[in-house]
Image: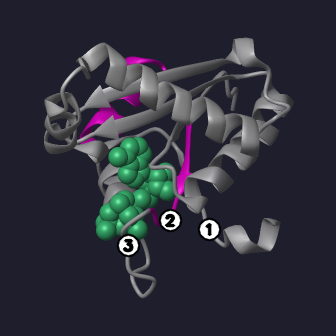
Amino acid sequence: MNVRHILVPTDFSPFSDLALRVASSLQEKFNARVTVLHVLTPLEADALTAQPGNPWENVVLQIQNAITEEVEKNAPSLPRESVNLEVVVGEPAEEIARFAEENGVDLIVMGTHGRTGLAGILLGSVTVGVIRRTCVPVVVVKCPEKLK
Ligand code: ATP
Ligand code: MN
């Protein structure tokens, strides 16, 4: 399997932090391109752009800055020129799967859980939704505390 393009969907949770660390080590082995993608729901996007003086371009920049910070913290050895930052609006699982299919992603690395999930549930709804929708292999990561 040739891994040229790795997709890391982030919700800025410790699970996404861990996914970035895993993706970074895979990136090195395969010399792959890495896209880090955050999906805003339409409700979140509306709330952010409703703030005065905060047009959509600003929202995108703010989120891209947050992604850059997360990447620098968790994957400092990832070459900057290998990383793309993407922000889209929609239903997260749908957009993650769509991005993977439309952009020739070879591997998705994401958390078993995210920001809002219950620990008793095996997989969060976004992870389940992505696995359901895509044929791209998905690596799911957990136990961030083990890698501190
Ligand atoms: P739920 O949202 O179902 O209550 P959860 O928050 O624990 O549960 P998920 O939302 O499925 O779990 O998150 C699992 C992984 O999916 C995260 O670690 C992250 O990689 C990805 N993810 C979740 N939400 C988003 C999002 N809005 N944009 C990009 N990636 C996301
Ligand atoms: Mn979630």
Residue indicated by mark 3: 117
Spatial CA distance of label 1 from label 3 is 13 Å
- Decide: is 115 above or below 139: below
Mark 1 or mark 3: which is in front? 3
Residue indicated by mark 2: 112
In the image, the residue with mark 3 has its CB under 8 Å from the nearest atom of ligand 1: yes
Q: Quadrant of the C terminus?
A: bottom right
Q: Position of residue 42 (x, y in %)?
A: 15, 38
Spatial CA distance of label 2 from label 3 is 9 Å
In the image, the residue with mark 2 has its CB under 8 Å from the nearest atom of ligand 1: yes
Horizontal relation, residue 47 to residue 110: left or right: left
Whether the residues at callouts 1 and 2 have beta carbons within 8 Å, the answer is: yes
Residue indicated by mark 1: 142
Q: Secondary structure at mark 2?
A: loop
Amino acid type of the residue tagged 3 in the rendering: Gly
Residue furthest out toward the front = 52
| Rendered residue at 18%/26% (across/down) | 52
Q: Which of the two residues, 123 or 84, is positioned nearer the viewer here?
A: 84
User: Which sits earlier in the primary sequence, circle 2 or circle 3?
Assistant: 2
User: Which sits earlier in the primary sequence, circle 1 or circle 2?
Assistant: 2
Spatial CA distance of label 1 from label 2 is 6 Å
Horizontal relation, residue 70 to residue 24: left or right: left
Residue 76 part of the magenta segment = no
Q: Residues within 10 Å of mark 2 (few under 14, many from 20)?
A: many
Q: Position of residue 47 (x, y in %)?
A: 17, 40
User: Which sits earlier in the primary sequence, circle 1 or circle 3?
Assistant: 3
Amino acid type of the residue tagged 2 in the rendering: Thr
Q: Range of the magenta residues?
A: 94-114
Q: Secondary structure at mark 1?
A: loop
In this orientation, does residue 65 appear? Answer: yes
Q: Position of residue 6 (x, y in %)?
A: 60, 31
